[in-house]
């Protein structure tokens, strides 16, 4: 049944990914004229396709959680080290928004950050170009531009579930009606998590970035905001709708589900993270979503990381934890190319 859904794993991962672009109202510099509407079907829906029940979704998640809990980590978030004679690269998996009270720092992590000449994130979130890019390459592409609306593409049963979810956080679905399903899903998920106490300003990147700016460190970035947007906007529309539906159906449970993922991350349990959000045979991913959200982006990052070894110095890379766990992780890809990497 997994291959019929985009759902839980992708929804959690999508929320954590895209909050780096929308959670703080910031994004990355990019120059693109690509729009998504030209490739979208103009059909409308009044009858919803068969969907999994809430119990089905929770059963699947609990099965993945049981597998995740079968492994344990060292007790702090994982970090990897790649080095040669004159270059040291630390790679650290992050969560883009966290509860402010969570303690996740370690002496080893702090030393790696302090020693770094350059901090590398997924995307630029501070430059003036980044501020402009969020309007053109994120928000604009998340809106219908072919005359349709969100309600037009939702079947009646889907709309009822999704409308009730938005009502539960005090936002009428009409306020989301210009958004494509993936954008509506991300907004719904982020708003629920923030209402429950998760804070983008407490996310790993936000904390590290503030310290790095104060220490006058240099910054680098692995991709543009348009590339992050591609991971969602270019998904088939039916998969986007499934993602939105399942986000809505499990909205009340989503903070606790992310709590469980964060527990695995804070323990440094890489196998646990892989079982929840970074496994092609795991729960809640279609092939297209897994490829778009993780594999394609990881493959694009590997040669950039290899090139960093050409310059002397110390580099600290902080990217979403899902990119550094599982069989198609950045770490696995680098090891498959013959690099010796310290870490799990």
Image (cartoon, rainbow, N blue to C red):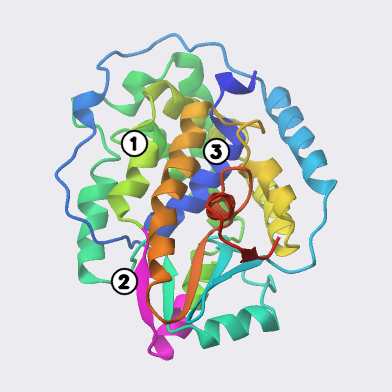
The stretch in magenta equals: 209-222
Mark on residue 21?
A: none
Q: Classify mark 2: residues with Cα within 10 Å, few (<14), some (14-19) or many (20+).
A: some
Name the residue tied to disc 3.
10
Please determine whether, in this image, residue 153 is positioned above or below residue 321: above
The x and y percentages for residue 318 are 51, 67
The x and y percentages for residue 49 are 50, 11
Nearest the eye: 243 or 341: 341
Could you tell me which residue is drawn at 72 percent across and 62 percent down? Answer: 268
Tell me if 84 is positioned left or right of 53 in this view.
Answer: left
Tell me if 296 is positioned left or right of 264 in this view.
Answer: left
Tell me if 94 is positioned left or right of 219 in this view.
Answer: right
- SS at badge 3: helix
Mark on residue 126?
A: 2
Quadrant including the N terminus: top right
Name the residue tied to disc 1.
233
Q: Residue furthest bottom?
A: 215
Could you tell me which residue is drawn at 71 percent across and 64 percent down? Answer: 266
- SS at badge 2: loop
Q: CA distance from mark 2 to mark 3?
A: 27 Å
| Residue 105 seen in this snapshot | yes
Nearest the eye: 333 or 65: 333
Nearest the eye: 168 or 130: 130
Q: CA distance from mark 1 to mark 3?
A: 14 Å
| Residue 253 seen in this snapshot | no
Could you tell me which residue is drawn at 29 percent across and 13 percent down? Answer: 43
Please determine whether, in this image, residue 274 is positioned above or below residue 155: below
């Amino acid at each position: 049944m997994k291959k019929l859904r985009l759902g839980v794993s992708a929804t959690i991962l999508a929320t954590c990914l895209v909050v780096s672009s929308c959670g703080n109202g910031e994004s990355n510099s990019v120059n693109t004229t690509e729009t998504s509407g030209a490739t979208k079907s103009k059909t409308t829906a009044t009858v919803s396709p068969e969907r999994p029940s809430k119990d089905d979704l929770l059963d699947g998640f609990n099965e993945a959680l049981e597998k995740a809990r079968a492994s344990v980590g060292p007790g702090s978030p994982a970090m990897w080290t790649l080095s040669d004679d004159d270059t040291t690269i630390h790679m650290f998996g992050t969560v883009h928004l966290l509860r402010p009270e969570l303690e996740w720092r370690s002496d080893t992590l702090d030393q790696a950050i302090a020693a770094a000449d350059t901090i590398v994130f997924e995307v630029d979130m501070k430059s003036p170009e980044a501020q402009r890019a969020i309007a053109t390459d994120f928000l604009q592409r998340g809106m219908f531009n072919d005359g349709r609306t969100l309600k037009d593409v939702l079947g009646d049963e889907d709309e009822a579930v999704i409308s009730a979810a938005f009502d539960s956080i005090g936002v009428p679905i009409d306020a989301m009606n210009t958004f494509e399903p993936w954008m509506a899903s991300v907004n719904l998920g982020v708003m629920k998590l923030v209402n429950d106490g998760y804070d983008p300003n407490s996310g790993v990147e936000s904390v590290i970035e503030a310290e790095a700016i104060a220490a006058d460190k240099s910054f680098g970035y692995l991709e543009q905001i348009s590339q992050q947007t591609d991971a969602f906007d270019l998904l088939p529309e039916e998969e986007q709708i499934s993602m939105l539906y399942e986000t809505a159906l499990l909205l009340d449970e989503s903070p606790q589900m992310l709590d469980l993922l964060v527990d695995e991350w804070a323990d440094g349990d890489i196998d646990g993270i892989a079982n929840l959000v970074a496994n092609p045979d795991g729960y809640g991913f279609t092939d297209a979503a897994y490829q778009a959200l993780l594999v394609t982006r990881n493959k694009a990052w590997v040669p950039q990381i290899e090139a960093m070894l050409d310059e002397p110095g110390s580099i600290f890379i902080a990217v979403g934890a899902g990119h550094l766990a599982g069989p198609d992780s950045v770490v696995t890809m680098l090891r498959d190319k013959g690099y010796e990497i310290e870490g799990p």
